[in-house]
Image (tube, rainbow, N blue to C red):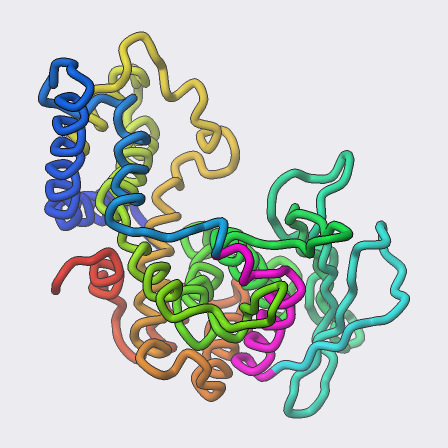
Amino acid sequence: MAKTAENVSEFLTQLWHKLTPLWDEERKYLLELKEEECKEIGIPFDGKLNVWDLRYYITKVEEKKYVVNQSKLREYFPLSVVTQGLLDIYQELLGLKFRKIEDAKAWNEDVQLFSVEDSSDEKLLGYFFLDLFPRMGKYGHAAIFELQPSCLLPDETRQIAVCAMVANFSKPQLDKPSLLDHNEVVTFFHEFGHVMHHICSQTDFAHFSGTNVERDFVEAPSQMLENWCWEREPLKRMSQHFLNKSELPEDSINALLKSRLANTGYHNLRQIVLAMFDYKIHTNPEADTKQMYSDVQREVLGIEPSEGTHFACHFGHLAGGYDAQYYSYLWSEVYSLDMFYSRFKDGKVMNSEVGREYREKILKPGGSKDAYDMIVDFLGREPTQDAFLINKGLKI
């Protein structure tokens, strides 16, 4: 989507300067916490934030300003309830019908298989497997694996899409079901968004099927659907106390929604540091990676890297498919939030008409259409950064 390196540089620089006021406020509070603690335990206050201070004081901020009892929250997210709520939400929103295939053959007894049909005409679109529990030798993260693309065959019939979503949620015990923390609920929604992208695309060629889109757009459809985990109605539909079946309390919902703003300045500028470092080493003929990283972090965050360390040596994305493309995470998030705020937020999170349009204009084309053109078509205008900045707590 970015087209040129200059566009990437401009994008990162603009976000850096717009997010800096947030970080200035957060940094001031972090320093106040540090000074207060230094006085309490009787050690000198050095007047600055060191790399090793960050995680500790950021956690302190979350505890003091955004009181979310994560262990209590887990009790309201049993996997079975979350799964059913998620499936119901996606079916209603996108105009689909899922049917569980009983006694389906799969690679493990815990794996479930579902068919996907268009709810309007019951046309079969594809199948997806849910492989949600850990086991010996299994892939250790959450991801989807595209097993068969949707495309036209030589006889003009359509090959249906098949994929598997893999995760490693805790397995149910005899006295307790599998309970998810909220981050795991968000992960579930995100990865299932990729499942829907794969299943709902209807391209002529396999090469453009599903998530075979521009790297700086591939996360946007799933990032957009993460927002349903931060809205009251969807949260209530996919939560229930595992013992007494009670609803998620309003005060817990309020605390959870408020916590989305915790340390947003730091977290996003940290992403800009990584993206700018990646950009710089790939747009210069030579690079002292240790010095270049130190310069970027110092300039953006105002924090010196730990002496004697070499961050680039363990930055796996540089050799894992995101080399020269790390900016894609922020780029796609900006567009995902523009889509959500413009078309779904404020009472429309379960609007099936808008959801069906999203399916038709964003998911169905796969990579057969330029992603920027798809977004403009869906928004009805040129995209902006405004929704992203509002979501991070800034006033526009």
**For the stretch drawn in magenta, what is the main secondary structure?**
helix
Locate the N terminus and report the quarter of the image it occupies: bottom left
269 lies above or below 355: above
Residue in the image at 22% along x and 45% along y:
265
Q: Residue sitting at 69 percent across and 39 percent down?
A: 139
Residue 67: x, y in percent? 32, 51
- Give 72 or 306, whichever is nearer the viewer: 72
Query: Is 240 left or right of 54, judged from the image as shown?
Result: right
What residue sits 70% from the left and 75% below the top? 116
The answer to whether residue 292 is above or below residue 198 is above
Q: Where in the figure is residue 183, as x and y percent of width and height? A: 48, 51
Q: Is residue 209 visible?
A: no
**Residue 219 relative to residue 89: left or right:** left
Between 283 and 147, the one lying in front of the other is: 147
Q: Position of residue 97 (x, y in %)?
A: 67, 81
- Choose between 294 and 67: the one closer to the eye: 67
Is 279 drawn above or below residue 113 in the view shown? Answer: above
Q: Is residue 135 visible?
A: yes
> Is 385 inside the magenta-drawn segment?
no
Residue 288 sits in quarter: top left
Q: Is residue 76 magenta?
A: yes
The image quadrant of residue 25 is top left
The quadrant in which the C terminus is found is: bottom left
Q: Residue at x 39, y 48 (%)?
A: 329
The residue range painted magenta reads 73-95
- Seen from the viewer's position, the closer of residues 243 and 367 is 243
| The quadrant where residue 395 appears | bottom left
Looking at this rendering, what residue extends furthest in the top direction?
308
Q: Position of residue 277 (x, y in %)?
A: 30, 30
User: How many discs appear?
Assistant: 0
